[in-house]
Amino acid sequence: MYKIRLRPLVSAIVLTGCSSAAFAQLGTNLSVDLRSLSMGNAVTADPPGVNAVHFNPAGLTKIEGLQTEQQIIVANFDIQREFSVPPGYNVFGYSDDPMVCNDGPEVASDICTDFKDKVHGDVEYPSLYIPILKKMVDLGEGMPLVAPTMGIAYNPPGSKATYATAVYAPLVAGFGAENGNAGNYMGQQVALERITYLSPSMGYQVNDQLSIGGGIGMSYQAMGLKTDLRFPNELIGMLRMIDEVVCTPFKENSDIITDILLLGMCNAEEGMNPFGKFGQMQLAVEQSLSPSFNLGVLWEPTDDFSFGMVYQSAAKMRLKGKYHIDNAKAPQELINGLMSSPTGQILAAILGFPNYIPSSESGLVSMDFEYPAHFQAGIKYKVMPDLQVNFDVGWTDYSAWDKFTFEFDRQISALKVAKLLSENVSDSSLSLPLGFTSPWNFGIGVEYSATDRLKLRAGYEPRSSAIPDGKRNTMIPINNAQLFGMGVGYRFDADTDLDLSIGFLRSKDNIPANTSSLANQTGVNNLLLNPYAGLNVKTNTKITILGLNYRTRW
């Protein structure tokens, strides 16, 4: 029973932490610079104008005089989620899950006689977290996410130093669905964003071949979540069996003897059901100032070849915010039943159970979060005077997400009980082992100068997943992914350039039943989050990005 109390809070926290991890990987470098996007982000040796402050600040030395950039990026998230029933599906002998079963109330059976072929819980609209309002806002079905950015750089006449700053979004992602969507048990609304609002940087030309650079990024980080909760595991199935089988003869005929022998559990007005909704959780955490730094080197021994490296530091944060839980009637009634019996009260006191579960709970939560460090190196080579090829390799330290620890502003009775079962729990804190890895990735880009004014670009970047197979879920709608980019650059005159780019990222994932402890694992010990326990899960993610960049020199 203590698990019932613990689960809503734990589940929401798992979702929030994992969604951050997921989208950080999914969204890396998708919304920073359009030329880079069209080149598969293989631009370390060929940094893109003012946005070199992010990709390689040493490339700022390529700028002369005063230069400004404005760009608008539009992104559409198409995330499909599918659930299906494998042979032998059941939870403690029950399979009448209304999410996947067509049987109506006229079928008096705990075993489903007519399973649905496939159930879809697709994302329906994008969402954003608004800092001033401190809430998530739906943008409407079919509406894209829009991210305007800008930057400015200045190279004083005769100086070897170039100074710059830019406003850009290393990560903006969010989605939502209407009530009743099958995917809502792992996030009805999710929003994650990291916005760099000030990035003072400098590039310095050491000599004709070598440049170095560095910069400081000042960013805003936020996460928001709203999710329905359910827990189809063996423990809840056993409680349903007790309510429907053991307690049935005593529902209307209980007395002090039965209350003592059955711990008062039969006095609950509503019994537990592994397929029932246990409540809803809303949570948001943020940090207004999250500093980091970038260091870069650019070596250009000839006009046809260059080599670049960049290190983007980790950003360690203390995210703070609030949570709110609406509890369903069934878990409240279970505790009320225990409290109605002398033996139930004794058991609750021994195990440290709460005396009651309120209809709603709220409080403060904080977590230490690290935006991971990133290293990238690459080359630029002109195979022909009009044809340039870029190739980069990169590494991101997602192993920093081995464990997330959440701290609460008060002692939680459920945690007092749970700490007896896990070394990752204390009276007022909870640590979640994630075990992420740090993969290497590569990107390749091609630029063809069709004329002195017109350039055509194409890029490809396969992205290896940092998420272990045993932790995949629908909140993280990505495993391995592929990013394709195309673009056109046009020079109107010596001081004005326009870039039009399109990017397309796709990822398909298949999570067979009972293979992920954050999605569909069965058994009594799935204490944290498995809302689709015993079901096959598939995701299909498509992200389309379209943008326009306007660059002017003064």
Image (cartoon, rainbow, N blue to C red):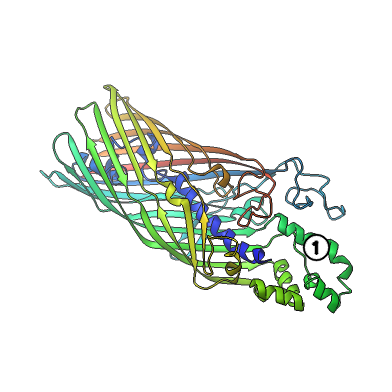
Q: Residue at x 86, y 77 (%)?
A: 255
Q: Nearer the viewer, residue 70 or 167?
A: 167
**Pointer 1 local density, CA inside 10 Å: few below 14, some 14–19, many at least 20:** some
Residue 356 visible, this angle: no
Image location (x, y in percent) of residue 83: 67, 44
Q: Is residue 299 left or right of residue 145?
A: left
Image location (x, y in percent) of residue 341: 77, 77
Residue 250 visible, this angle: yes
Q: Residue furthest top?
A: 384
Q: Is residue 91 left or right of residue 539?
A: right
Q: Is residue 304 left or right of residue 11?
A: left
**Dot 1: what SS?**
helix
Image location (x, y in percent) of residue 263: 77, 72
Q: Which quadrant, please, contains the C terminus?
A: top left
Q: Which quadrant, please, contains the N terminus?
A: bottom right
Image location (x, y in percent) of residue 269: 79, 71
Q: Is residue 56 left or right of residue 286?
A: left
Q: Nearer the viewer, residue 260 or 242?
A: 260
Pointer 1 residue: 242
Q: Nearer the viewer, residue 385 or 405?
A: 405
User: Based on the displayed image, in which of its 4 quarters is residue 286 positioned?
Assistant: bottom left
Q: Residue at x 49, y 38 (%)?
A: 505
Where 225 falls versus 169 (above or below)? below
Q: Residue furthest left?
A: 158
Q: Count of labels shown? A: 1
Residue type at mark 1 is: Ile
